[in-house]
Amino acid sequence: MSARRLPGPAAIRAKGWFRAHRWLLARRAVQLGFLALFLSGPLLGVWIAKGTLATSLTLGVLPLSDPFIVLQSLVARHAPETAALLGALIVLAAYALLRGRLFCSWVCPVNVVTDGAAALRRRLGWREGVRLDRRLRLVVLAGALLASAVGGSIAWELVNPITMTHRALVFGSSLAWGVVAAVFLFDLAVAPRGWCGALCPVGAFYGLIGRWGRVRVGAPQRAACDHCQDCFQVCPEPHVITPSLKDPDSDLILSRDCTACGRCVDVCPQSVFVLGVGRQGPVAGAAPLRQGDLP
């Protein structure tokens, strides 16, 4: 494989443009859909959802709250309203059932920012950068809870790019756009996939609550893998892929870090991967990956 090969063109030639982008298009549609729910009120006077991704009320009856924010409130010794607690439980149950990090790839507005930075890095051929330990996000998660407990406030919300980005899109905020630009430049020029992959405590939290979720990526056609590594290039958590290609007992990606974004499905010219609910199909036999084939 050429060191400069870009992921995508081979899949387009093999499957057509739409099949090579269908999960990416689906994610962007869902992300825009969530944004539209909040913008319908300010723009059209039809209030479908009031609030932000931190806490909202949908159709005037359904409360939804970010469980990580509610947890910070509890450790800060605040007493959340009943609606906030109920909303957190609803969201918690949904992501525990589906997959925690679906939030990261299908809902979070910062995902568009970090995906854009990663795509530009590939286009520019930038392969160097600071490689941060992904366990750092657990340290940041613990630090946010400790800061909330000591300071008596919801500490992470003071700097949370997710909430700031959503508020900027819905309400407008020059400061929030500065934070968005900082995340983009950090991923682009400093640490590839550094924000979501190693620092964001929200993603770490959702990974912990939904590691056994039913939405999964599998590699039922892994015997067809030709080691092009396109999947590794586009995956925001590339370490999760190898077990699905080599484990003799399962072709599923079981890691809690998987965001089920479907990009590996899109860009694979050999149609090795699938994304769906539950079991993805029988083990098809592991392709004989060589040590040099691994990233």
Image (spheres, grey):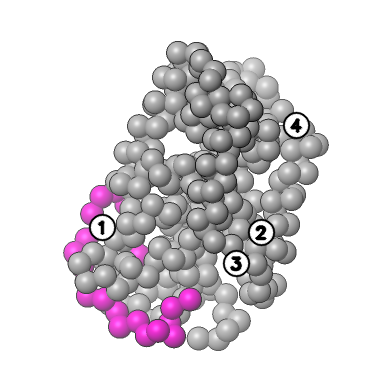
- Tell me how far mark 3 sits from mark 1, CA to CA: 32 Å
Q: Residue at x 70, y 57 (%)?
A: 186
User: Rounded to the nearest whole Å, what is the CA distance between mark 4 and mark 2?
Assistant: 23 Å
Q: Start and end of the magenta stretch?
A: 271-295
Which residue does the numbered mark 3 point to in the structure image? 131
Q: Point out residue 65 in the picture as x, y percentages from the top left corner.
A: 49, 26
- Whole-angstrom CA distance, mark 1 to mark 4, is 42 Å
Q: CA distance from mark 2 to mark 3?
A: 11 Å
> What element does badge 4 sit on?
loop
Q: Is residue 219 magenta?
A: no
Q: Earlier in the sequence, mark 2 or mark 3?
A: 3
Marked residue nearer the N-terminal end (1 or 4): 4
Residue 120 falls in which quadrant of the image? bottom right
Does 247 appear above or below 95? below
Q: Which residue type carries mark 4?
A: Gly
- Residue at which label 2 appears: 187
N-term mark: 3 or 1: 3
Give the x, y percent position of residue 115: 60, 56
Q: Looking at the image, is mark 2 or mark 1 earlier in the sequence?
A: 2
Q: Which mark is residue 172?
A: 4
What is the x, y in percent for residue 1? 50, 86
Q: Is residue 209 above or below residue 125?
A: above
Where's residue 271, x and y in %?
Answer: 36, 69
Mark 3 falls on what kind of element?
A: loop
Q: CA distance from mark 4 to mark 3?
A: 33 Å
Disc 1: which residue: 280
Neighbour class for label 4 at 10 Å: few (<14), some, many (≥20)? few
Location of residue 51 (image quadrant): top right
Q: Is residue 21 left or right of residue 50?
A: left
Measured along the vertical axis of the image, is residue 106 above or below residue 286?
above
